[in-house]
Image (cartoon, rainbow, N blue to C red):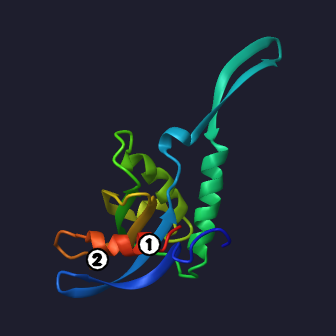
Amino acid sequence: MEGYPKIFGQQMVRLPLDGKKIIARRIILPMPPSENKRIAVTVTDKYFRTKRYSGKRYHNSTEYNSWLHAAKSLLKKGGLGLYDVPVFVWYHVIFPDLRTVRDAQNREKAFFDSMSGTVYTDDKHIWEHTTVKKVIKGKSFIHAFVFPLRDMPMCRLVIDDEYLQEIAEQID
């Protein structure tokens, strides 16, 4: 896709975990809008038959829909099939600074929505996930590994900062 670094999207990788090489999908996407910016509200003031109705209608914002469309397009370019089994998602949110308003969990909904229909058939396949917040000065993106839950070793996953820095250098 135009306008995005080539590294964005998904690809199959061998992930060394607990002395084994696990085949996983590496997903790298631009930072999604915050959950606080996902919802748009439309105030309605209409007449139904003889009664006036005032209320609010909630829907996804234009910013959220634009990001979701771009993310799904980036994920489809990998041309990989869909998981139809329980999966584990190891999710890193990379922020450009340590501002106190940075909330990694506010980015999860958009990220998981983007993977539905491009990485797995439905959200019901996410059985476990881990969210990690990191800071790389001046960079913001999402990095994740997705693999079948049956392949998950009983160990703690750790990504070193050098690895994420290499990815950050490819994003501009």
Judge the density around disc 1: few (<14), some (14-19), many (≥20) Cα neighbours within 10 Å.
few
Provide residue 37's location: percent of width, then percent of height: 55, 40
Tell me the kind of residue under disc 2: Arg
Local secondary structure at mark 2: helix
Q: Could you tell me which residue is drawn at 16 percent across and 72 percent down? A: 155
Tag 1 residue: 169
97 above or below 162?
above
Q: Could you tell me which residue is drawn at 38 percent across and 39 percent down? A: 101
Tell me the kind of residue under disc 1: Glu
Instruction: Work out whether residue 51 can be spotted.
Output: yes
Quarter occupied by residue 12: bottom left
What is the number of callouts on the image? Answer: 2
Q: Which mark is residue 76?
A: none
Q: Could you tell me which residue is drawn at 50 percent across and 65 percent down? A: 29
Q: Sequence-wise, which precedes: disc 1 or disc 2?
A: 2
Local secondary structure at mark 1: helix
Horizontally, residue 169 falls left or right of residue 42, namely left
